[in-house]
Amino acid sequence: MIEDIQAAIPLGFLLSFMIGPVFFVLLETSATKGFRAGVSLDIGVIIADIVFLLIAYFSSFQLLENLSNEPGLFVFGGMILLVYGIFLFVKKAKKKSNVKASKGTYLGLMVKGFLLNFINIGVLAFWLGLIIVVGPSLENNPNRMLVFFSTVILVYFGTDLLKIILAKQLKRYLTQERIVLIKKGLGIVLIICGIVLITKGFLPKERFDIQEEIEKIEKL
C-alpha cells in the first residue's frame, strides 16, 4: 500500500500542472477574489474529476477483468496517453487575456469549476487510459485502486492549494512562451509514457510496475 501511495504522489503533482482553461481561471479567480473563491472553484474541478474517474472505472471494470493479462490492454491504454500527449504538444496555447474570472457566490464558483472541467472530454479519456494502465499493476484490487487514486486526487488538490496561495506570483511569471514550454513538456512526458506502455504490450512476459515506470520518468 505504501508503494501505491508513493507511485501516486508524482502523478497527482503532474496533473495539477496540466495547462488548460481551468488552470488559468483558477489563477485568475484566486488572484482577484481571494483564497476562498479559489478553493470553491477548485472543489468544483475536483468533483468533476472524481465523477470522471468513477465513470472511467465502472465503464472499464469489465474490460480490466477480462483483459488484465493481455498485452493489448497496455497497447490500448498507451495509445490513449500517446494521443493525449501529442494533442498537448501540438496544441497552441490561448492567450491568458481570453480567460477571466466570473462573478458569483462560492457555490456559483464551485458549479463553474465543475462545468469547466466536465465539458472537457479529454479529461475522461485521460482517466480512462490511466485506469486501464494502472489497474493490472494494482491487481485490479478495488482497495488498492481506491488508495492509489485517492492519493492522486489529494496530492492534486494540495498542489492546487499552493497555486491558489501563490496565484498572483504565478500569473506574473506565466508568460505565453513559458506556457507553451510547460504544455510541450507535459505532452512529451505523456508521449513517453504512451510509448513505454505500447512497447510493454509487445513484451507481455515482463511484469509492468507503475512505480518503476514513474521513477524512470522522474529521472529524465
Image (cartoon, rainbow, N blue to C red):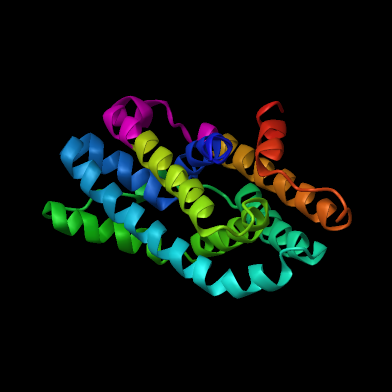
Q: What stretch is highlighted in magenta?
A: 161-179
Tell me which residue sits at (64%, 56%) in the image.
139
* Quarter where residue 16 is shown: top left
Tell me which residue sits at (70%, 26%) in the image.
219
Task: Name above or below for residue 96 compared with residue 63.
Answer: above
Left or right of residue 141, residue 78 in this image: right
Tell me which residue sits at (79%, 65%) in the image.
70
Is residue 96 or residue 145 the one in the foreground?
145
The percent position of residue 80, horizontal first and vertical second, equals 67, 61
Q: Quick check: is 175 in the magenta stretch? A: yes
Left or right of residue 131, residue 43 in this image: left
Q: Main secondary structure of the magenta part?
A: helix
Task: Name above or below for residue 216 compared with residue 104.
Answer: above
* Quarter where residue 30 is shown: top left
Tell me which residue sits at (36%, 60%) in the image.
48
The percent position of residue 58, horizontal first and vertical second, equals 50, 71
The percent position of residue 17, horizontal first and vertical second, equals 48, 39
Q: Quick check: is 39 in the magenta stretch? A: no
Q: In the rendered view of the protein, which quadrant contains the C terminus? A: top right
